[in-house]
Amino acid sequence: MKIITIIDSFAQNEKTRNAVKNSITKCRSLGHDIMLTSGAVVPEDIQEMVDYLYHDKRNQLFQMDDYNYTQRWDFWINTGSNYRSHHHYYSRQRHGLAVLINLINSVKLAKSLGYTHFQKVLYDLEPTDKCLGWIKNIPSFCESKGKKGLFYYNDDQGYSPDIEGTYFFCEIDYFLSKIPDVQNEGDYRKHILDNEGSLEFLIFERFIYYFLEKNSDDEIIKRDSSKYKIDFDNVDSPSMISPLNFESKYSGCPIRIFRAAEGEDKEVVVLGMNFSGQNIERKVLAHLPDGITTRIFNMEEGGWTFHAFPKDLIKIEVFDMEDNLIYTELNENIENWIEKV
């Protein structure tokens, strides 16, 4: 068994570059060669830290918008130490195509280099020493069970189950025999149409899950999400949120209406979170029965801010600082909510 660690990354700023470096350092302790995959240019100091680099400068994103977007996400994000925000929306994950293509091609490259197995790690995973011990044991654990890999299945997500994309381990030949070869959006669409009969949009994690299950996944160990929480206990959830997870109208900085964690019968919360990679300032007009209130949302890169309004808020209008209307959101059937933790 010759194993390579494949770290999936997109290091576009200092924060993400530091996360990549930390991940590489952690993964070195596993004792395997490392291949870094990236759609962004990788600085030379990071290149020197790995054994192989797979860089696709095309960074292919989903361009078509005629898919059936049916995967409803509860996209939760910690907001401070006491609260967690739950964003509900239909996932478009535009960068998912690049992630899929890069993984398939890096696995092919690993095979050509003589590797037989790979483990895929997300670049901002922060594993503890205990977790690293478990990861190091996974290959022998699979071998002892006569299995070709280990994946974490999120089967508790209703009609759209998927895998945990942060980590999985698999025999290369097995993986390539189960997952269709995708080199561009046309390939992706063809595989979806051939198997689903319609253009159902499958995010990266759902795509892997779908074809593993469809092509018979009885030769891998399938651990559920509760096991993931045990195996990766005290491991911080990946914190680098891509702006491509959200609809393009938000420009990486969604400002949305949320049900409040406390006092829900009296107020709603308008919460802004900035994943754009730059400082953002927005003007928000809150329309109330007795008039319009203006609030300025000034958010640093990776930052957030909020304002509370009476429950009878009618709508918000979000403008840039040159008074161009970006989008409007109505206070109707709000599924987003703030949880006290």
Image (cartoon, rainbow, N blue to C red):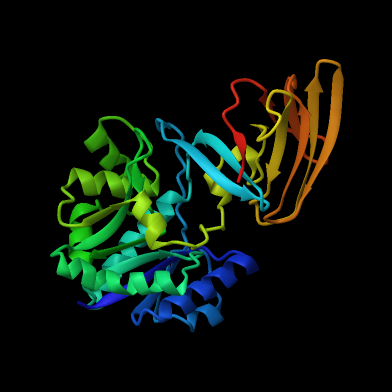
Q: Nearer the viewer, residue 312 or 256?
A: 312
Rendered location of residue 37, percent (x, y): 42, 67
Q: Viewed as shown, does residue 100 lie left or right of 255?
A: left
**Residue 176 figure quarter:** bottom left
Horizontal and vertical percent position of residue 307: 78, 37
| Quadrant location of the N terminus in the rendered image | bottom left
For image coordinates 66% across by 53% down, the residue present is 81
Visible in this render: residue 165?
Answer: no
Is 70 left or right of 196, judged from the image as shown? right
Asked if residue 287 lies left or right of residue 47, the reply is: right
Q: Is residue 31 above or below residue 60?
A: below
- Residue 49 visible to the viewer: yes
Point out residue 172 in the picture as x, y percentages from the top left corner: 22, 66
Instruction: Name which residue lies at 54% across and 47% down.
Output: 244
Whether residue 283 sits left or right of residue 238 in the image: it is right
Find residue 104 and report its image quarter: bottom left
Residue nearer the viewer, 120 or 48:
120
Instruction: Give the image location of residue 318, x and y in percent.
Output: 74, 33
- Answer above or below: position of 78 versus 136: above
Q: Residue at x 63, y 46 (%)?
A: 252
* Above or below, comparing residue 328 to residue 226 in the picture: above
Q: Nearer the viewer, residue 164 or 249?
A: 164
Image mark count = 0
Task: Residue lying at the far left in this picture: please name it.
Answer: 146
